[in-house]
Amino acid sequence: AQKVTQAQTEISVVEKEDVTLDCVYETRDTTYYLFWYKQPPSGELVFLIRRNSFDEQNEISGRYSWNFQKSTSSFNFTITASQVVDSAVYFCALTKRSGNTGKLIFGQGTTLQVKP
Amino acid sequence: GAGVSQSPRYKVTKRGQDVALRCDPISGHVSLYWYRQALGQGPEFLTYFNYEAQQDKSGLPNDRFSAERPEGSISTLTIQRTEQRDSAMYRCASSLGTGFEQYFGPGTRLTVT
C-alpha cells in the first residue's frame, strides 16, 4: 500500500525565516513520482513540482528547493526567506509510475503561516 | 490557455436528491481524475479516466457514485440519493497522461441538507 505522511500539522514562522516542510512516503513500487501542491487561502490547488523516483538530484526554483532522499523515503520542501504570500496549506503526494492508474495519494497537509 | 473548469461551483441539495457535477479538462489532456476533499484533509481519489475509458474507480465510496466521460473530454460525476456525509469539495484534475502533473479545477462545494 502507498502512504504519505506529513507529520507537521502547522508551522508558524516570521517573514524572512527559512522553513522546511517534511514529507515521508511508503511504497512497494520501485518506480514512482512525488509531487508538492500548494493550497492558498483562496482554495485552489496549485502544482509546484514533480519528481521521478529515478532522479535524486535536488531541485531549486527561486526561493523553493526540494530534497529527495530515497534512502530515507523523504521528499522535503524548503522555502528560503519566507514571505507572507507563502502562507498556505502544502500537500505532498505520491503516484505509481506504471499501471493503469494515475491516482495521487496525498498527505494530510502542512499549514504554513508566515507572519509579517 | 484555459485551465480546468468545474460547474457548478456551489451546490446545495436536499438529502435524497441526485446531483451531477461537471468537469471540463484542459484541452489535449487525455487523463482526467475526480477527487473529494474534506475540510482539513488532503484530496482523496475517487476515479480516473484515460480518454473515455474509466480505468480505475476503486475510490468511489459506494454504488451511489458514478462517473462518465463519453467523448473523452467533459466528465460528469453523479451522486444518487445524496446523503449528508456526501457533503465535501469535489475536485476534478486533468493531465497529459498517467504520471504527469495533474492540474486541478476550482472544485464544486457540495452541501447536502
Image (cartoon, rainbow, N blue to C red):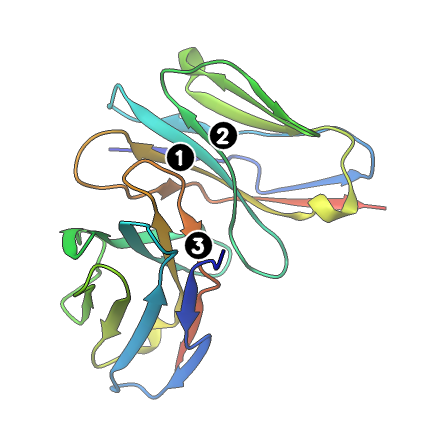
Residue in the image at 76% along x and 44% along y? A114
Left or right: A5 as drawn, with respect to A101: right
Circle 2 sits in a helix, a strand or a loop, which is it? Answer: loop
Residue in the image at 41% along x and 11% along y? A71
Residue B37 in which image quadrant: bottom left
Circle 3 chain? B
Label 2 belongs to which residue?
A23
Q: Name the residue type under label 1.
A: Val
Circle 3 sits in a helix, a strand or a loop, which is it? Answer: strand
| Crowd tier of the residue under label 1, counting other residues whose Cα lies within 10 Å: few below 14, some 14–19, many 20 or above | many
Residue in the image at 28% along x and 66% along y? B74
Residue B13 in which image quadrant: bottom left
Spatial CA distance of label 2 from label 1 is 7 Å
Circle 2 chain? A
Label 1 belongs to which residue?
A4
Label 3 belongs to which residue?
B104
Foreground: disc 2 or disc 3: 3
The answer to whether B88 is drawn above or below residue A1 in the figure is below
Label total for image: 3
Circle 1 sits in a helix, a strand or a loop, which is it? Answer: strand
Q: Name the residue type under label 3.
A: Phe
Left or right: B34 as drawn, with respect to B103: left
| Crowd tier of the residue under label 2, counting other residues whose Cα lies within 10 Å: few below 14, some 14–19, many 20 or above | many
Q: Are marks 2 and 1 in contact (CB under 8 Å)?
A: yes
Circle 1 chain? A
The answer to whether A88 is drawn above or below residue A8 in the figure is below
Position of the N terminus of chain A, as image quadrant, is: top left
Position of residue B100 measured from the top left corner of the image (x, y, whole percent) = 36, 37
| Crowd tier of the residue under label 3, counting other residues whose Cα lies within 10 Å: few below 14, some 14–19, many 20 or above | many
Position of residue B94 measured from the top left corner of the image (x, y, whole percent) = 35, 52
